Image (tube, rainbow, N blue to C red):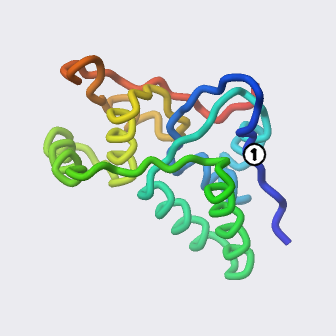
Amino acid sequence: MPQKKSLKATSTKKRELVLLDTGPLVGLYNKRDDWHARCNAFFKQDIGYDYLLTQAVICEVVFHIQKDEHVQAASKAVIHFLGLIDGNKLQVHELESGYVLRIKQLREKYEDKKLDFADLSLVLAAEDRQIDQVVTLDRKDFGFLKFKSGSGRKQEQGFRIILPEPT
């Protein structure tokens, strides 16, 4: 039976909403991942974050969990992960209508970069919610990605990266 994973996401204190990328979740669930121990320790802490992800991140996480585990273990891990969403431990940002056009604009802007749909969906979530922090292992991509911010969304802002390192 797979080890029980937990994300600390309930507290009486006001919690900060941050974006959550695919990598830390894959690291949490995949025991063979180089980041497994760090992700496991990071998510066990109560560090005052609530996590926001997108449907694209959910798809990537499920894909990677399923390809890296035996069928039964993968099924249990996926069920646990989806339970975190169903139990409101993870929040899902619904992309607004017109998101395809914005993704297309971002792909054109960054056409010389190898970016995946999940990363770009987090840019849209950042723009919609005005969130500049992302928990990710992908320092390279989130180091140059920018999202529209400010009143009228005329400014561009970079992300503050939170690496899953235990404190």
x, y percent for residue 109: 16, 39
x, y percent for residue 27: 64, 51
Residue 102 sits above or below residue 167 on the image: below
Instruction: Determine which residue is flagged by label 1.
Output: 40
Dot 1 alpha-carbon crowd within 10 angstroms: few under 14, some 14 to 19, many 20 or more = many
Q: Nearer the viewer, residue 131 or 67?
A: 131
Q: Can you name the residue that lies furthest to the bottom here?
A: 71
Regarding residue 112, the answer to whether it shows in the image is no
Q: Can you name the residue that lies furthest to the front here?
A: 12
Quadrant for the C terminus in the image: top right
Q: Nearer the viewer, residue 121 or 85?
A: 85
Quadrant for the N terminus in the image: bottom right
Left or right: 154 in relation to 160: left
Residue 135 sits above or below residue 156 on the image: below
Q: Residue at x 20, y 45 (%)?
A: 102
- The quadrant where residue 78 appears: bottom right
Q: Residue at x 47, y 40 (%)?
A: 138
Q: Callout 1: helix, strand or loop?
A: helix
Residue 118 sits above or below residue 68 on the image: above
x, y percent for residue 31: 73, 58
Regarding residue 3, the answer to whether it shows in the image is yes
Left or right: 6 in relation to 163: right
Number of labels in the image equals 1
- The quadrant where residue 123 appears: top left
x, y percent for residue 47: 72, 27
Q: Residue at x 16, y 50 (%)?
A: 101
Amino acid at pointer 1: Asn
